[in-house]
Image: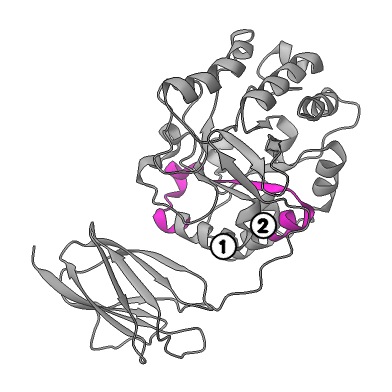
Amino acid sequence: MSDRTILTIVYNSDGQPVPGATVKIDDATLHTGTTDASGFCPLQVSAIPASHLWITAPGYIDYSHHLDLPLTNVQIRVGYPPDPDRPTDVLLPPLQATTPTPDPGTIRPLTSEGVTIRDVETGDRVSLCGYDQFTALHATLHGTDLTPFITETQAIGFNMWRVFGEASSTENGYYTLDPHTPGYYDALDSLAQQLHTAGIYLLFTTYADNQVLHCSLEHWYKCAEVLRPYQEGVFLSGGNQYQKNGWDPYGLPDPHIKWWSRGSSTEDDQNPVPPNGATFAEFHPRRDYPKALDDTVASATNLQYTKHFNVPLLITEPPRMGEDGSGTPYLDPQICWQFARHYSTQCAGAVLHMRPGQKGTLIDPNSACDRIAAAWVAAFAL
């Protein structure tokens, strides 16, 4: 196919051109240029419609946008007014100035060393002790105060929340979270800021129930853009169990965020999603006791030494513990302690999977879930 000229015009939210911005368009070949004093950057790009645009400029938030371009010469107008005589031009939002780096609270920067996560400052090994808070973004979007849930998490000793980015009541039976809802990405920013300040790492599961909600890759790019300022305390997951939830882990591009995965497969998948450039991996193990207890050791060694997943591994959905769990054995705090102890020594972290966290309720004091939560955290004391 012959090349065509793509003129990218870059303006900011104040309606002013952004000179010196680096513009990249990927159409299977990466094309790079720089905007002039008028914010203009022409590039010769092949006549392939599916492309991706990146723009970086000092003082501005990194810009990322998937494009379906017409097969002719066209202008990409980033924050630049439309021309009624040019109906095929691509109109995009303006560049936004960067905001100050958020207060890290008690979030400790982490780094990886093969399959191990370490504290940047001390060099100590870290295994993240997570808990389900599936509905936390839905709650934030609808104005619910998360303070009681944050207080509960801090009192018990968890340091990570697993939060869903999508949900459909037709699939889960109790709530819907649609990224097309106005205010969604503002709520995501608010949630990330609250957890960052509270010292709770956010494991954000981008796609779930996408077979109903039909969000495109644009959702992935937007979530990454919102969460990037908080990336020392964010683990961005591609999504939940791709085979049944309508999204493609292999099609996710690098979101340019410190910690990201391609998400999870269904339970005990013998061929789980490989990292392929991602910085951590996820696994959902089997749930049938006692083989599931064997799997607390076998999964990590199989993924590391047989599958060659040489990145930190998070067990993001183990057997469901407590009342209405995956079986009677999971009512026993000692058995749940064993699971957590194995995960804490074999993996980079694991998420306690219980009904209260799935449904967005506090844990009842003196319940089985309460005793199990305490046992889980105790097991993570390395």
Kindly identify the residue that appears in the image at 54 percent across and 44 percent down. Answer: 168
109 sits left or right of 259 in the view: right
Magenta residue span: 191-219
Q: Residue 297, image x and y in percent?
A: 60, 16
Which residue is the site of mark 2?
A: 192
Task: Determine contact: label 2, label 1, CB under 8 Å.
Answer: yes
Which one is in front, 266 or 53?
53
Q: Quadrant of residue 141?
A: bottom right
**Label placed on residue 296:** none
Query: Does 143 appear in magenta?
Result: no
Q: Secondary structure at mark 2?
A: helix
Q: Quadrant of the N terminus?
A: bottom left
Tell me residue 236's x, y (percent): 55, 48
The residue furthest top is: 290
Q: Is residue 192 magenta?
A: yes
Count every numbered label the image shows and give the total.
2
Residue 14 appears left or right of 196: left
Q: Is residue 194 above or below residue 242?
A: below
Q: Is residue 56 above or below residue 222?
A: below
Disc 1 marks which residue?
A: 226
Secondary element type, mark 1 = helix
Whole-percent x, y for residue 235 in the image? 59, 47
Q: Nearer the viewer, residue 188 or 64?
A: 64
Label 2 to label 1: alpha-carbon separation: 9 Å
